[in-house]
Amino acid sequence: MNARLPLTGALRLGRPSDIWFKPALSVVVAVAPPNLTLLALGRLDLAMYTMAGSLCALYAHSRPYAARARALAWVLLGMVTGLGVALVAASLTGSAVVLVTVGALLAAVQKALCDATRIGPPGHVILTFISSAALFAPQTLAQVPGHLALAVTAGAWAWLVCMAPGLLRPHGPERRATAHALLAAAAYVESRRASAGRTEARRGAHTGRTEASRGAHADLTPESGTAHADLTPESRTAHTAVQAAWHTLLSRGARSETRRALERLVVRAEIALSAPADTDPARLRAWARALRGNGPVPRAPYDDELLGVDVELALPAHPWWRALGPLAPIAVRTALGCALAGYVSLALGVGRPYWALVTAASLYQANITLTWSRGVQRVVGNLVGVLVFAAVVPLAHLGAAALVLCCLAFNFGAEALIARNYWLGSICVTPMALLITEFAGYQEPGRLITERLVDTLVGAVVGFLAAVAVTNRRAGDRVERALAAVEEARERTARLLAEPRPAPAALDHARRVLAAALVDLRAGVEAASGEWWQRALPQERVVRAERNGHRTLAATVRHHRAEGADA
C-alpha cells in the first residue's frame, strides 16, 4: 500500500467558496415553488419527483451562462433518464435484490458520466440519490409518464432560476474565474519573494563556507529556482486557478470584447507564474478587485498574445467519451460497492437499503486516500446529522407546512456549508433526507434514526472495502500519458523558441498547451500517489519534466518581452 489514510485531517475546514450563496439560494428558489404548490394541493407525496428536477439547480454555477445553459440541460436529461429507469424497474419488479442491483449499475454509470464530462460538484451523488430512492417508491407503469412530467417541469423551472442572474451580470462567472486566477498568481508571487528573502538570509549566514559547499546550492539560482518553486502548494494552486480560468473563458461561443479583456488578464496571471520576479502582485490584486460588479474590465497590455487563443478555439474539442476508459476501475468500484452495501443492508433487515447504496456511491473519489477521507466525512456528518434531525423533528411534525419549510432551510444550509467540508454539509443533508421520507406521511423518528445510522455504517465500511478490492492500475498509466504529453509539449515549444522569429500565435498556443499539460501531470501524480497497491511512480522523471517544463514556460515569457523591446 502506497497511500496513508488520514483521520483528523479529513475533517479540517476549508475556506468557503466565493459563490457559496449562489447554489444555496438557487436550490431554495428552485425547490420552494413546486413543493409549496404540492402542499397547497395536498399532494406532498409527489414531492420526490419535483425534487428530482429542482435539484438540478445545484450544478454548473461556475460556468459562463451559455455553457451553463447547455450543462443544465444535460444534467436534467441525465436526471430524468435515471429517474425513468428507476421508476420502470420499480413498476416491473418488487424484488429488493434486483432493485439494489439496478441502483448499483445506475450509480456506476452516473459516476462515470459525471467524471468524464467534468460536470463538477455535486457530481453523481444527487443523481444517484434520486434514482435510488425512486427504485423503492411504489409505482405502476401507468404512473411513470406523469411522474417524469413533474420532474421535467420542475427541472425547467430550475433551469430558469440558474440562468436568471445572467440578466444582471452576464459575465459574472468569467469575471470570478479571472479574479481568482489573478489573486492566486499574486499569492504565488508573494510566496516566491518571501522564499527568496529567506534564501538570501541563509546565504548571508553561510558567507564563510568554502566554494565547494556553496556549490551544493547551485540550483537556487533565479532561473532554476523557478522550477523548484513551481512544485510548491502555492504554485500548484495558482496554476490550477489559471487553467480553470482558461477552461471558463475558452468555452465555445461568441467572444465579446469583455471576454477578450478578461483573457488578457488571465495572460497576465499566466506570465506572473513564469516570471514572478518581474511581477507586481499589488497590480494583480487591483485588477482582481476591479472585476467585482459590472464595471469596466481593466485593460492589460500585449493584445497580440490572444492570437494563441484564436488558434486554440479553432481546434476541434476533445470528445468527453475518451475519458471513459481510464474511469473504468472507479466505475467498477462504484457498482460493486453500491451493490454489496445494498445487499448487506437487506440482510440486516433495514427497510431502506438505498441509503446504504447512496452512502457507498458518495465515497468514491479519484483514489483510495480521498475515498477514505470522504468516508470519514460522511460518517461524522451523518452521525451529527441524525442528532440534528432528532432535535428538529418535533418542529417538523407540527404540520405539512413546517415540514416543507424545514426541508428548505436544510437545503440552504447544506449548500452553504458543504464548500467548507463535506462533513459539515452532511449535517444538513442527513436531516433533509430523513424529512423528505415523511412527505408521504409521518414516521416513527426512532426507527428512522436507527436505520439511517445502520445504513451509513454499512455503506461506508462495505463501500470502502470494495474500493480496496478493486485496484486502479490505470492511475499509473495516466501519469505515463501525462508525462509523454508534457515532454512532447515542451519539445514543441522549445523548437519554436529556437526559430529566429517564431509566429506569436503558435508560440502562445504552445505555451498554453504546455501549461495545461503540466497541471494535468501534477493532478495525475497526486491521484496515483494516493492509490492502493500502485506500482512505483517515475518520481525522478516527473520532477525533471516539471522542472524543464516550467523553465521552458519562463523562456517563452522572456522571448515575448525581448520581442516587445525590439519592436
Image (cartoon, grey):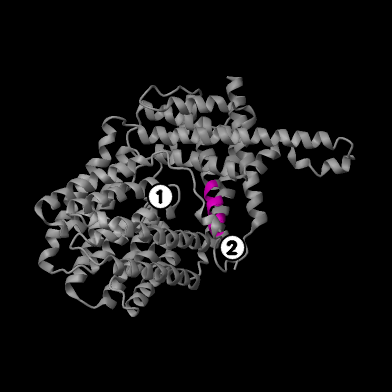
Query: What's the residue type where badge 2 is placed?
Result: Arg
Q: CA distance from mark 1 to mark 2?
A: 24 Å
Q: Quadrant of the N terminus?
A: bottom right
Residue 92's place in the image compared with 71, above or below, is: below
Quarter-wise, where is residue 19 in the image? top left
The numbered dot on residue 418 is 1
Q: Position of residue 386 (x, y in %)?
A: 36, 61
Q: Residue at x 34, y 42 (%)?
A: 61
Judge from the rendering whether residue 253 lies leftward or rightward of residue 240; answer left or right.
left
In this rendering, does residue 415 appear at all? yes
Assess disc 1: are there few (<14), some (14-19) or many (≥20) residues with their C-alpha within 10 Å of its C-alpha. Answer: many
Judge from the rendering whether residue 171 lies leftward or rightward of residue 44; answer left or right.
right
Magenta extent: 519-528
Assess disc 2: are there few (<14), some (14-19) or many (≥20) residues with their C-alpha within 10 Å of its C-alpha. Answer: few
Residue 214's place in the image compared with 117, above or below, is: above
Question: Does the magenta run of residues contain 523?
Answer: yes
Query: What's the residue type where badge 1 is placed?
Result: Ile
Q: Residue at x 83, y 36 (%)?
A: 205
